[in-house]
Image: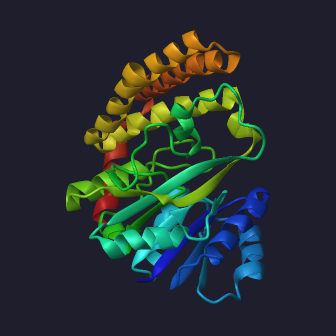
Amino acid sequence: MKVSVVICTYAMERYDVFSECVDSVLEQTYDPLEVVIVVDGNEPVFERVCDDYGDLEDVVLHCNDENQGISYSRTRGAEIATGDVVAFIDDDAVAEPDWVAELARVYEESDSIAVGGHAKPDWVTKKPDFFPEEFYWLVGCDERGMGEHMEELRNTYGSNISFRRDVFLNVGGYDENTGRKGDRHIQAHEAPVCIRMANKYGKGVIYNTDAVVNHKLFDYRGDFQWLVFRSFWQGYSKRIMDLLLPEASGDKNDYLKRLMLEFVPERLKNLIRQPSLPKAKQFMTIFIFTAAVGLGYLYGLADVDSSELISDCEVSATD
């Protein structure tokens, strides 16, 4: 079974960490493996990619004519790929040597149509003491309570997810209404494609925690104001998801209930029993981030042109 790994990149300032990502994929223990690199409309970056990787066997390079965003780029990479399975990794993540082998093992041993793995936070500097694990999803890493090993989930995160290629393309790939594009901060682009997949095939994503990528988290991802901003846009993105796929609200509502009814009371008990400043900070941060998500959702209620958004989605689905 051939696996194609799609890596999308766009900025020269990310090139060093992007190179680490590509090298980690090239050093995988699994074979046969294809690497598809998609540069999102940046010719200088593409020229450098060609110089560094253009002569390598089983490496395919593509540059979009203009900046199209992460969702378009990933779907384009899957279209170019020739593997039975297409796996995605962020350009600021580094895969463990057996990452692809662990993803492939699940496909080989079951009738799974999508497999994800553990997106592990790799803080380039010290992790901020106010940041609760319940909100690691803000930085594309697995949060507390995400799921058990080999559990079927709605989706894992974009830095560590794979699909049978025909299934991925049959449901239209990533929705271009979601995902970051330039200065547009729409997030949560994994959920819509996985929900469409579940609707059509009746299956979710198998969560193999042994398939590990280390998602590098630079200083700015630990900045409190940036995280509040990120929370706001997550809420906005959730509003878009509700318009595209109303059934998407179930999982986020379930997690909110678990957060407030299980994790928050547990944290409060621990804070009372063994008080500390970091515990107090994390306890308060949970409420601040939750409020920011809610405000973003409310802003989306007023700001999003639902008729235009849905018509765009319908057009992409029929192409």
- Is residue 77 among what the camera can see? no
Residue 228 appears in which quarter of the rendering?
A: top right
Q: Percent x, y for residue 134? A: 51, 32
Residue 246 relative to residue 269: left or right? left
Q: Residue at left 71%, top 72%? A: 46
Q: Residue at left 78%, top 81%? A: 51
Q: Is residue 32 above or below residue 6?
A: below
Q: Is residue 278 above or below residue 168?
A: above
Q: Percent x, y for residue 259? A: 42, 26
Residue 4 relative to residue 182: left or right? left
Residue 143 relative to residue 204: left or right? right
- Viewer-nearest residue: 293 or 148: 148
- Farthest-out residue, front: 273
Q: Is residue 203 above or below residue 264?
A: below
Q: Is residue 150 above or below residue 294?
A: below
Q: How is the image coloured?
A: rainbow
Q: Residue at left 77%, top 69%? A: 44
Q: Percent x, y for residue 213? A: 58, 58
- Viewer-nearest residue: 155 or 225: 155
Q: Quadrant of the N terminus?
A: bottom left
Q: Percent x, y for residue 74? A: 50, 64
Q: Residue at left 45%, top 83%? A: 2
- Is residue 248 among what the camera can see? yes
- Farthest-out residue, top: 272
